[in-house]
Image (cartoon, rainbow, N blue to C red):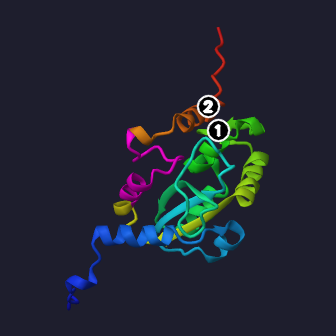
Amino acid sequence: MTIPETRPDDVQTGGARVEDALRLLSGVPLGLDVAVKRLSRGSGVYAWWAGPLIFPDLPGPSNESDPSVRLLYLGRATSLRGRILRNHLRRSGSSTLRRTLAGLLVSEGYRTTWTDRVVLVSEDEARLTAWMYAHLRLTWAEDPEPATIEAELVRRVHPPLNVHGVDPEHIQAAVVAAKNSYNASSRPVEPSRTP
């Protein structure tokens, strides 16, 4: 068996990978109707962006290529296409972003139910997806090991909807409250007691 030789200039350091990802994530965010057609099946990191009137009390950094939008959330995926399409744009049960959005949009009357966890009712899953298409944009950067760069990216850019990996002074109390409110909105049905 022959092992191909790896030259030092062929291997990107973690720092260089973070810089490349930041550059790509700071590119012009795409509307979801375009983004979903272009998403790769490869692994990587992704960023959700919105105009400043979306959650104005939760300011994130402006996009370098399009200052009219600011960062809301940053995540990682082993399949960018799968994560965005099957989780973030479909099921609240497997998307922290969707649960947080539903909690923040509580005044919009999103309804939940209990399965094995708190989830939006099917009509409101569809309504939240439509809201995301109308208000959010997306950028992404492919990376072979996104878990190794995600924490550094979150630490550097402080996305307001992220809680895990964010330095404590940058955690937004309103986001934590929204998550808690969403999680408390439905409970498992208690078994009835018979005497």
Q: Earlier in the sequence, mark 1 or mark 2?
A: 1
Q: How busy is the neighbourhood of tag 2: few (under 14 within 10 Å), some, or many (20 plus)?
A: some
The amino acid on which the numbered mark 1 sits, given as a three-letter code, is: Gly
Q: How busy is the neighbourhood of tag 1: few (under 14 within 10 Å), some, or many (20 plus)?
A: many
Q: Which residue is mark 2?
A: 181
Residue 170, relative to residue 189: is it above or below?
Answer: below
Locate the C terminus by quadrant: top right
14 left or right, relative to 133: left
Confirm whether the magenta stretch covers residue 154: yes
Closest to the observer, 176 or 190:
176
Q: Position of residue 108 (x, y in %)?
A: 77, 39
Q: Are marks 1 and 2 in contact (CB under 8 Å)?
A: yes
Say how many tags the image has. Answer: 2
The amino acid on which the numbered mark 2 sits, given as a three-letter code, is: Ser
Q: Which residue is mark 1?
A: 103
Q: Position of residue 94 (x, y in %)?
A: 57, 50
Dot 1: element: helix
Q: Which residues are magenta?
A: 150-168
Residue 107, relative to residue 36: is it above or below?
Answer: above
Residue 96, relative to residue 195: is it above or below?
Answer: below
104 left or right, relative to 169: right
Checking the image for residue 53, the label placed there is: none
Asked whether residue 144 appears in the rendered view, the answer is: no
Q: Position of residue 111 (x, y in %)?
A: 74, 37
**Residue 11 appears in which quarter of the rendering?**
bottom left
Asked whether residue 180 appears in the rendered view, the answer is: yes
Closest to the observer, 195 or 3:
3
115 left or right, relative to 140: right
